Amino acid sequence: MSKTLCEWKRKDIESKLSQLADIVSPSHFICKKCARSASDKKYLCKGTKLK
Ligand SMILES: [Zn+2]
């Protein structure tokens, strides 16, 4: 299993940029704790659906 986007470090972001693009777009969910957005709740630790 891959970790949630919330757990990504700067290094992860740099090395997995194309994967990141797939995860954040389209951004239907946002993390209430970390203010990150993603296409699916499973990528976030406190994911909530955007209206
Ligand atoms: Zn989070």
Image (cartoon, grey):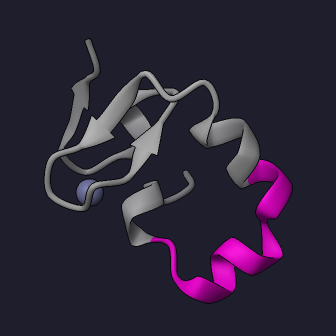
Give the left or right position of residue 49, taking residue 16 as reference: left
Within the image, what quadrant is residue 16 found in? bottom right
Q: Is residue 5 left or right of residue 34?
A: right
In the rendered view, tell whether residue 45 sits above or below residue 51. below
Residue 43 in the figure: left or right of residue 47: right
Foreground residue among 25 and 1: 25
Image x and y of residue 15, in percent: 81, 77
Q: Is residue 30 above or below residue 44?
A: above
Q: Quadrant of residue 41?
A: top left
The residue sitting at 60% across, 24% down in the picture is: 26
Which residue does the image show at 28% across and 20% down from the upper left? 50
Magenta segment range?
8-19
**Residue 40, horizontal then vertical, whole percent:** 46, 27
Residue 19 % position (x, y)? 77, 50
How many marks on residues? 0
- At 47% from the left and 57% from the top, the residue drawn is 5
Location of residue 27 with respect to 21 vertically, above or below: above
Question: Residue lying furthest top in this view?
Answer: 51
* Residue 9 place in picture, x, y as percent: 52, 82
